[in-house]
Image: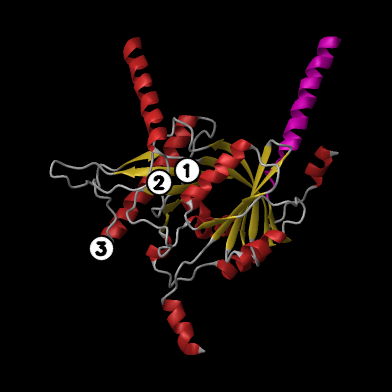
Amino acid sequence: DRGTSIVEKTTFRNKEKVLILATRGITHRYRHLMGDLKQILPHHKSEPKLDTKDDRGVVNEVAELQNCTSAVLFEVRKHTDLYMWLAKTPAGPSVKFHVVNIHTMAELKLSGNHLLGSRPVLSFDATFDKQPHLQVLKELLSQIFATPKTHRKVKPFFDHVFSFSVADTRIWFRNYQVVLPSDKAGKQQLDGMTLVEVGPRMCLNPIRIFAGGFGGAVLYDNPHYVSPNQIRSDEKREAGKEYKQKVR
Amino acid sequence: SGLMDQEEREAIYNVDGLHEGLEQIGWDESVIWEEGRIITNETPTQVSDINDDLSRELAFYNQALTSAREACNLFTKAKVPFRRPDDYYAEMVKSDQHMGKVRERLLVQQKQIEESE
């Protein structure tokens, strides 16, 4: 009825819960990345490895059973290539990314740190608002990476930023600690703000956007995407050419 | 045949479908900023050479810094407390043991720089 809809509209609360899981066959490095995501998304729920590689629609059901509204699925092929699905469950839309340039939080060169469970600010490159497919990706990333204010694991204070940039037709993710220096009186100075990278790092190459959760009509197919299999076979062919020339 | 598939693959760009999808899930205008803490910068992030680590990372850093500053202004305006007091201790994403290793590595690097000078 009308009365409640008005109330709902003015009191909208972000109550997203994100299911994070992997298909069987995930390698240790990618499992570390998944662990990092679980740490920085306190509003996630875990599930044991998914047994099937073909019927991803099952994830929609698992998410529903866990009261989740979205899901992140890690899918590893040939023990080398990582694909990551982001989906609003069960109705979609969803996206499949090929993930490259991964650095996990365990790497010592990323020297930042932040509270476990503090809520991030999400920084988006202006480019996201320029094209329809990027707008959809921004909405998916926002809803999955923003931590609900009222979640029970949330700690107060702002001490880190997730940034999403578009470059080379891909999306680059970074996580920075926010450092505010204190003056002599112990008051923190906004002007002297610096950032220190915490990690993880990843570069997401969108392959396709689907209308549903984990499938359905294809809304976007990236013309710039070249599969890692293709790249490997091209490289092999090139290497072969060189050899043939040497034999002659 | 892999190459053939690539050439024959037609790019799909269903603008109406994408808009519909966005409408279906998009948070409406009434969402107060504090619920999502999402900042979209005014100027696009420009990376001159994607293979040059330094310039690429600097571009990302500057984007994040601009947003973080903007966020602090919004927190201040809305009177949302956001500064972590120096005496507030709680569990961090990286353990003390891990941070010890990070510090050790930094010290070793510093020493190497000093020795080479």
Q: Compute the Cα span from label 2 to label 3.
A: 22 Å
Residue type at mark 1 is Arg
Q: Nearer the viewer, residue A15 or A238?
A: A15
Q: Nearer the viewer, residue A83 or B74?
A: A83
Q: Which residue is mark 1?
A: A174
Q: Which residue is mark 3?
A: B79
At horizontal 27% and vertical 52% (from top left) the residue drawn is: B83
Q: Residues within 10 Å of mark 2 (few under 14, many from 20)?
A: many
Q: Which residue is mark 2?
A: B64
Left or right: residue A54 compared with residue A15: right
For numbered disc 2, what is the local secondary structure?
Answer: helix
Asked if one can make out residue B104 in the rendered structure from this viewpoint, the answer is yes
Q: Compute the Cα span from label 3 to label 1.
A: 28 Å
Residue type at mark 3 is Lys
- Magenta span: A222-248
Relative height, residue A217 to residue B45 (above, below): below
- Residue A103 placement (x, y as % from top left): 53, 36
Q: Main secondary structure of the magenta part?
A: helix
